[in-house]
Image (cartoon, rainbow, N blue to C red):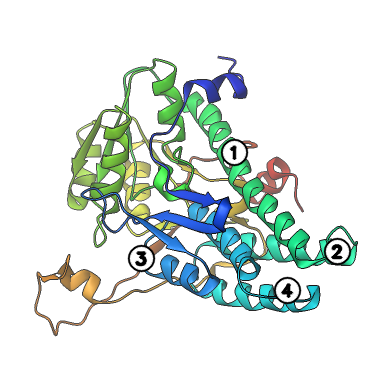
Amino acid sequence: MRIDLEELKSKIKPKLRPIIWRDEDNTLLLLDQRKLPFEEVYVELRDPVSTADAIKQMIIRGAPAIGITAAYGMVLAIAHGNIPTLDEALNELVKARDVLNTARPTAHNLFWATERMLNVARNAVHNGSAKNVKELLNIMKMEAKAIFDEEFDAELMMGIYGLEKINDGDTVLTQCNAGGLATGTGIGTATAPVRVAHALGIKVSVIAPETRPWLQGARLTVYELMVDGIPVTLITDTAVGYVMYRGMVNSVMVGADRILRYGHVYNKIGTFKEAVIAHELGIPFYAIAPSSTFDLKSRVEDVKIEERDPDEVRKIRGVLIAPENVPVFNPVFDVTPPKYVTALITEKGIIYPPFDKNIPKVLSVT
């Protein structure tokens, strides 16, 4: 099926807007995902420190959305206050990059976005396209918007490529939230093929595990799919194996926070389990992510898996569900080895094993 990108844009109009840039007063608005699905509240940000804190506190989450947010956090470094010279503006941007990069250590899009924004600023100053701080600010705002627009188009392209892996009547198992809330665009990565299929009248449904401890599957994936009228069923994390064993799943589609050269997929904790079970049962497992999520330089031993507050496991919404002094191990990502990955789906095409040869080829990088 040949699908035109511009035509598809006319059919898909996301109802949720996780990230909004208010140009008239240079303010970043983030939909507070901690309060969903019960409240839709936006947090206003006007500096890089509060932006980094919003990422740390999970007001915004998901690798692509973190990248877009970080890009606007760089804009905020020079959007307010009296910065007299371009040299001082560049100094502020370096400080902002360093602050933002500490927010979430596993999401590769974060570092990619801050470095891109800093390089754009340096180039604008050095080549003379920015003659003062106001002109630099405008260039930075255009670049942040470009990152958002590129992500939106990339997700639609991932949806178009991923549609090859969906048949009418299929049920897709996912993990965590790799939908439009996680990417900031309203489309998503893992849910992009589902959204494209739905827009084209192809029947497809989703099974979403709850995803402890933050319950992103229950609170966010279920919520956003229901808002858009896409059939979805919620299950407990512990039901994943049984659901696949019963033949209730045609494929597994997950997002990714980082993908390495050999095809190792870093994603929300629980992804590895889904991949192993899918492999054993002959169910295809796809990781869907934009090219900005690929990290072709790091090795497995280089990647730091983030561990978060033990109380996220001991409590749900502030209520203790376990002894308050019990030791807790709370890694929030895991790594899926390439042997369990059927294919990687990107905006540039579908990548099959051997990944170390085909990833650079499809992404056109060395």
- Quote the CA–CA distance across marks 2 and 3: 44 Å
- Quote the CA–CA distance across marks 3 and 1: 26 Å
Circle 4 crowding by C-alpha within 10 Å: few under 14, some 14–19, many from 20:
many
Q: Which residue does the numbered mark 3 point to in the structure image? A: 332
Task: Please state which of the two labelled residues, at mark 1 or mark 4, is closer to the viewer.
Answer: 4
Q: x%, y% of residue 132?
A: 81, 66
Name the disc covering residue 131, or none: 2
Q: Which residue does the numbered mark 1 point to in the structure image? A: 154
Residue drawn at x 72%, y 79% is 91
Q: x%, y% of residue 187?
A: 46, 37
Q: Which of marks 3 and 1 is nearer the N terminus?
A: 1
- Quote the CA–CA distance across marks 4 and 2: 12 Å
Q: What element carries label 3?
A: loop
Q: Do the residues labelled 1 and 4 touch (CB within 8 Å)?
A: no
Which quarter of the picture shows residue 128? bottom right
Q: Is mark 2 on a helix, strand or loop?
A: loop
Task: Please state which of the two labelled residues, at mark 3 or mark 4, is closer to the viewer.
Answer: 4
Q: Which residue does the numbered mark 4 point to in the structure image? A: 89
Q: How many labels, in total? A: 4
Q: Is mark 1 on a helix, strand or loop?
A: helix
